[in-house]
Image (cartoon, rainbow, N blue to C red):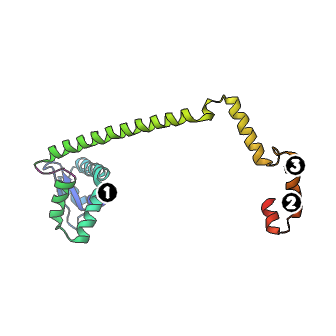
Amino acid sequence: MCLGLLQKYRLNLQSKKLERKSDDEDDEQSLAKSGGNRDEFVRAMLVLKMGCQRWVEDYGSETSGFIYKSVKEKLHSADDAAQDFCVNYANLCGKSKAEKRKQEKAKEKERQQKRREMMKKEDEREAARSKDDPLKALPESSKLGLQQMLEAAKNDPLQYMDDEAKQRIQQARTDLRCEVCRVVFD
């Protein structure tokens, strides 16, 4: 978006206006039209670029969506679309822009307050859950012991079984006739 803007427009710092370049105009011709001072010309182009980047950061997705909808549904002419976006969506133009911005700030403050309240409630629920967790009350050495027992059981499932259960499992291993069952069991 900004590259297209830099290619098609130049910023005139004396009149503080954005001027459209002619289709065949290059940077040297733009420099000559701006008064010939290369430093001022480069500064104006950098100001235009930085302004465009800030605009895109703040309003880029809204602008793209608005343009897509306007073109697809043929709602506006280019000038009407620009005016509608500026006044109704971005709140950068019009008589009530200051009031709309204040309303947006108030809504944002309200949203942040609700987020804080929701986060506080979630923290309280998490604290209640952690109180009910029986493992939290155990000392670290007990937790470590439980972890080692679980890992041992994972590595050797027969380790904690009594001898009779181990014998039945060993007998079942030899009695299995299905190859798939043997592979799954092993």
Residue interval drawn in magenta = 90-94
**Residue at horizontal 28 percent and vertical 53 percent from the top:** 59
Residue projecting furthest to the left? 95
Where residue 36 sits in the image (x, y, percent)?
A: 20, 52
Q: Nearer the viewer, residue 18 or 117?
A: 117
Quickly name the residue at label 2: 173
Q: Nearer the viewer, mark 3 or mark 2?
A: 3
- Helix, strand, or loop for circle 1? helix
Nearer to us of marks 1 and 3 is 3
In three-dimensional space, the C-alpha distance between marks 3 and 2, rounded to whole angstroms, equals 14 Å
Q: Nearer the viewer, mark 2 or mark 1?
A: 2
Q: Tag 2: Cα neighbours inside 10 Å, few (<14), some, or many (≥20)?
A: some
Amino acid at pointer 3: Glu
Q: Residue at x 25, y 43 (%)?
A: 107
Residue linked to disc 3: 164
Marks 1/3 in contact by CB < 8 Å: the verdict is no
Choose between 22 and 101: the one closer to the eye: 101
Between discs 2 and 1, the one toward the N terminus:
1
Helix or strand or loop: what does disc 3 sit on?
Answer: helix
Choose the circle earlier in sequence order: 1 or 3.
1
Task: Work out whether mark 3 precedes mark 2 in sequence or the reverse, and give the earlier one.
Answer: 3
Q: Give coordinates of residue 164: x percent, y percent.
A: 87, 49
What is the chief secondary structure element of the magenta stretch? Answer: loop
Spatial CA span between label 1 and label 3: 69 Å
Q: Which mark is residue 61?
A: 1
Q: Is 124 located above or below residue 85 in the figure?
A: above
